[in-house]
Amino acid sequence: MYIIFFIVVALFAGLIYLLRSAIKRQNKKISSIEYAVIIGYILSLAISGIGLLTHSSQYHEAVDPVDGACYLPFGGKHALSLFIYFVAFNAAVMAIWIKGRKIPPIPLVLALIILMIGSIISIFVLTQVSYHDTSTLSIYVGNDGTFYFIFTPLFCFCFGIGFIWKIIREERETSLHRTYRNPILNKINILLSSKLDYPLWALILLVPVFLMLTAILILFGQDSDSMAKVFTETTTWAFSQKMHPPILDHRGHYLCTVAAKGDPTVVKPLRLGKRHGNTIIVNRQLLVANAFEEILSDLSPVLHRYVRSFYDRYGYNISTRINSVKASNLTYMMMKPLEYIFLFFLYTLYIEPEKKIAKQYA
């Protein structure tokens, strides 16, 4: 997981370095709008990198959503193909942004082909990450990763379409003012100017170049259909065709740990209860906290989802450290003020708050 994150960070740093060096050599002046776009793009890459910290598991791995673990939208070894196209796309964007049409014809056509392919891939990536179904991850539906991954493909698609249009416009203006003495050549020039010239050749050569790049990627261990499998060999995302294993047992609520491991004269266990099919020891503090959670869920499901996600993630870590009677007693006493606050809301919003409390974990 962290290796992937560091690779992405290294890529960001490399792109920034190359961009800075190229601009410096070309003495190119950057407008405030261009600065804003660059900063926005770098931020989108950084957000994607953060997303990889919690969305790094493959479809065949069991995860514990309480720890924030979730599934990567791009599948297994096939992600290398996507990565290579991503690097090539960014190189083409930088080349055309810095030099425009001041590139030899063949490299310019190749750059346009990469922009076309990259724009198409961006549409598929955008579709893939725009839908994340976490309903199969039990009650933990807070791992919605669309926020992390949606911005980068949006930027890439806009870059691709924008720079293709830039070359089309410039080439059309040049071709319209260019004439040849030979009437046949002149007619060809008019035809090409009406057919968008370089972009026309880029469109014609799109498939052969794509096949050539696929052949090169096969030499690096990729499958011939890796660009399809990178989306389908995943789980919980839009194009996913795989099912993940059952989620890992997160071992319950940390207040369950307090009720089970504390001194009975302090934490005052009341009875046994059921939580996700497991038998647990419950005390009043746990019952009150769970009843309050139901209030929060009824009043604001969105707020409850984020509170639940935060509570599970950090509460679970706390529970792993409650390994003694003293630790359980201390946690119980520290939770007392919150217990009274929860009781205040219960007695304010319910006619029979004690019935609400008593039915928890029945």
Image: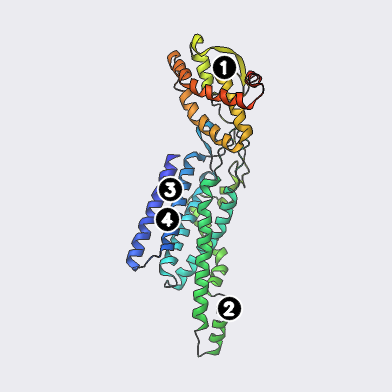
Q: Which residue is mark 3?
A: 8
Q: Label 3, label 2: how many angstroms apart (C-alpha)?
A: 42 Å
Query: Dot 2, crowdedness within 10 Å: few (<14), some or many (≥20)?
Result: few
Identify the element where label 2 is drawn: helix
Q: Which residue is mark 1?
A: 284
Taking the spot 44% from the left edge, 15% from the top edge, the residue there is 324
Q: Which residue is mark 4?
A: 39
Q: Label 1, label 2: how many angstroms apart (C-alpha)?
A: 79 Å
N-terminal label among 1 and 3: 3
Taking the spot 51% from the left edge, 58% from the top edge, the residue there is 156
Q: Which mark is residue 194?
A: 2
N-terminal label among 3 and 4: 3
Residue type at mark 3 is: Val
Left or right: 34 with respect to 205?
Answer: left
Q: Nearer the viewer, mark 4 or mark 2?
A: 4
Identify the image quadrant of the N terminus: top left
Residue type at mark 1 is: Arg
Look at the image and tell me whether residue 211 can be seen: no
